[in-house]
Amino acid sequence: MSKRIDINNLNVYYGEFLAVEDVSLSIEPKSITAFIGPSGCGKSTFLRTLNRMHEVIPGARVEGEVLIDGVNLYGDNVDPVTVRRHVGMVFQRPNPFPTMSIAENVLAGYRLNNKRVSKSQADDLVEESLRGANLWNEVKDRLDRPGSSLSGGQQQRLCIARAIAIKPDVLLMDEPCSALDPISTLAIEDLMAELKDQYTIVIVTHNMQQAARVSDRTAFFNIAGTGKPGKLIEMNETPVMFSTPSEKATEDYISGRFG
Ligand SMILES: Nc1ncnc2c1ncn2[C@@H]1O[C@H](COP(=O)(O)OP(=O)(O)O)[C@@H](O)[C@H]1O
Ligand SMILES: [Mg+2]
């Protein structure tokens, strides 16, 4: 169940440090939104506020609203654990549990939320999730092997399978291909294009070709200098952002004249 996200006037802090300032933007369901911008401008920080992962760091907090289909994630009585069940996350480095089998890796998140799962339910969920992550055919004969026996690209698809096994509404991906070779990268990009029929997808990427290839809309973030907060400079349909951006800073960044 894909959902829309509306972020209103979000400030993101690490203690006293304002890392991201006053961001308002909307993310459409059944689409891929890319966050681009130079290193340190707060892309990862901002992404982690969308499933309340930011606040696990001591002193970290936000001001403002993140609405998912109109419900504020930061409202009173909202349980961050529930939020994370609806908003899944895939990280830069594939992080399967190394000693757990491929099948158990797929089930790991699901088991946290559902104590009792029958063998046949578990088998079905493993197959469905691995098929959903375009990995089933490669691993169906070795589901009991450790997750760490897979290649990097396969491990990342395994992490995507683990994320979709809990049937989230939103999938956040922080530079999901930055540790992968070009072939594995294309496999993940193809997968994202398929998954957007079912999920709201948000990716951070430092690879502008990737943003141009996979995303429907692109948001460009920038910082004025070290110690300054990251800000959203502009957001638009991806082809527009890459052909006729409104802001000079965007044009400089996408044409490689950044700095
Ligand atoms: N755990 C943390 N504690 C304090 N500051 C942090 C932490 N993580 C990131 N930052 C700071 O927040 C800013 C944004 O970082 P980050 O979100 O990682 O940027 P990006 O993903 O765009 O490279 C940087 O100044 C970074 O040093
Ligand atoms: Mg980052």
Image (cartoon, rainbow, N blue to C red):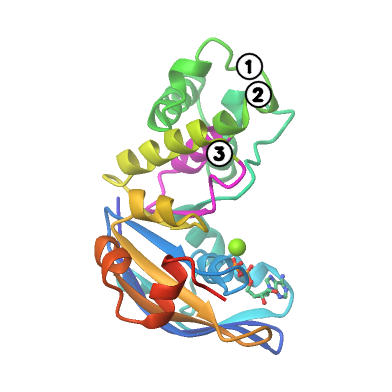
In terms of secondary structure, where does tag 3 sit?
helix
Q: Residue at x 54, y 46 (%)?
A: 113
Q: Where is residue 68 drawn, in percent x and y?
A: 35, 68
Q: Quadrant of the C terminus?
A: bottom right
Q: Residues within 10 Å of mark 3 (few under 14, many from 20)?
A: many
The residue wearing badge 1 is 144
**Residue drawn 56% across and 42% down?**
109
Q: Position of residue 3 (x, y in %)?
A: 30, 59
Q: Nearer the viewer, mark 1 or mark 3?
A: 3
Q: Earlier in the sequence, mark 1 or mark 2?
A: 2
| Identity, as a three-letter code, of the amino acid under mark 1 | Asp
Which of marks 3 and 2 precedes in the sequence?
A: 2
Name the residue carrying label 3: 159
Q: Amino acid at mark 3?
A: Cys
Q: In percent of the image, x 59 and y 85: which residue is there? A: 229
Q: Which residues are magenta?
A: 156-179
Are the residues tagged 1 and 2 within 8 Å (C-beta)? yes
The residues bearing labels 2 and 3 have C-alpha atoms spaced at a distance of 13 Å
Identified by mark 2, the residue type is: Ser
Q: Compute the Cα span from label 1 to label 2.
A: 5 Å
